[in-house]
Image: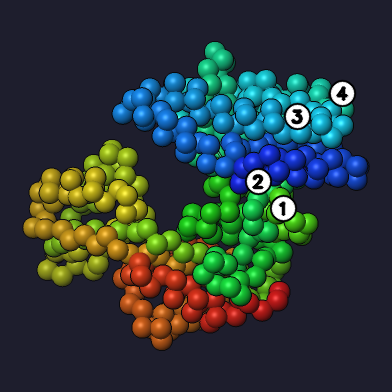
Amino acid sequence: MLVVQKYGGTSVADADRIRHVAGRVIKRIKAGDQVVVVVSAMGNTTDELIDLALSVSPDPDPRELDMLLSTGEQMSVALVAMALRALGQEAVGLTANQAGIYTRAQYGSGRIARVEADRVRAELAAGRVPIIAGFQGTTDDQEIVTLGRGASDTTAVALAIALGAERCENCKDVEGVYTADPRIVPTARRLKDITYEEMLELASQGSQVMHNRAVELASVYNLPVLVTSSMVDAPGTLIHGESELEERNRVRGIAHDSDVAKITVRRVPDRPGIAANIFEPLANAGISVDTIVQNASEGHLTDLSFTLSRGDLRKAESLMPGICESVGSPEYTADANLGKVSIVGVGIQTAHGYAARMFRTLFDAGINIELISTSEIRLTCIIAADRVNDAVRALHDAFELERAE
Ligand code: ASP
Ligand code: MG
């Protein structure tokens, strides 16, 4: 079968690991598969390059920043290709331009517009393993554009789709997707498989397994993605479209995020247009708002709360006095030390008892719920940041996630 394997920064962090990756690729080819490799920059290279840019300019030019950042992945492809050749396997390192990964000119946040994979196919046909730089694209004018932090995953998925690969393999320093963060819950269990929707909820709720856009893209094209280890031979977790209909336990995992702030706009007159007046200035300032709760109004006055990431709180607070004035609110309050914990699983909304069990579990652990939000496959509680780990452990226990599937 034809597979696209993506190796992240940790998996190619030094010479030993690069040689290890080369060995794995060769093993795979010997087993009869065709392999295309996508790599990230070594270790913390991207962060180091950003620091370097900031050391010469407080506000680096976006075009030149992308010129610089794209070199991290270019180093990796060259080194992986060399390591393969040293082991007797023909290979060729390719930049995004050489591999035909096209984007529009949005420096720092390019989106892949199309992949022209002829060169990659030709290299494969000639018996050379194509090693492709992740995280970068080229415009029609040969400008180099990066795709956003962590976006090598997206490069790999886009290439797999363009090549008609059987699947994409995301080879990482973890062995798959777990029922909760194993650093918090030692008994967390690796999932055999998970649906795209569940993976998206887990990821956007703060589980750092895979780039969201990569999962979205895989979902649109129904491309199976295996999240697996680059270090040891492990079965991994398959992200795909199916889920067993009669899943015994509908909760697949617990996601958490300790980086949440909340703003409450107090005593807002309850009339049309208020929400727009509050959220438009925030959106215009590039602040994304997460959970929004408007309380029932009492005497035509209502409290409106929303959450945002802690890093955006200062910027948001600088806008709040103006916003309060424009909607006729006397004051707002802000809380910087919140977090969120979610249970995720297809069918939890329609099945009985999941919400009740979640709330009961948090109550029994003495954890106060500030806000609640739901989606079709997720139930999220906003709680104090310093209770997030306790909540994750208590919920993992309550939903019996350590038990084998
Ligand atoms: N090297 C880039 C980053 O650190 C892309 C990636 O790792 O996927 O964000
Ligand atoms: Mg990286």
Tell me residue 193's x, y (percent): 70, 61
Q: How crowded is mark 3: few (under 14 residues within 10 Å), some or many (20 or more)?
A: many
- Residue at the (68%, 73%) spot, across then down: 247
Front-lying residue, 109 or 55: 55
Q: Is mark 4 on a helix, strand or loop?
A: loop
- Dot 2 amino acid type: Ser
Q: How crowded is mark 2: few (under 14 residues within 10 Å), some or many (20 or more)?
A: many
Q: In which quarter of the image is the C terminus?
A: bottom right
**Image quadrant in which you'd find residue 40:** top right
Q: Does the residue labelled 3 lie within 8 Å of ligand 1?
A: no
Asked whether the residues under the numbered discs 2 and 1 touch, taking CB atoms below 8 Å apart as contact, a structural biologist would say yes
Residue 6 visible (yes or no): no
Residue 81 visible (yes or no): yes
Numbered label attached to residue 126: 4
Distance, label 2 to label 1, CA atoms, is 8 Å
Q: Name the side, left or right, on which 127 lies relative to 59.
A: right
Q: Name the residue under label 2.
A: 11
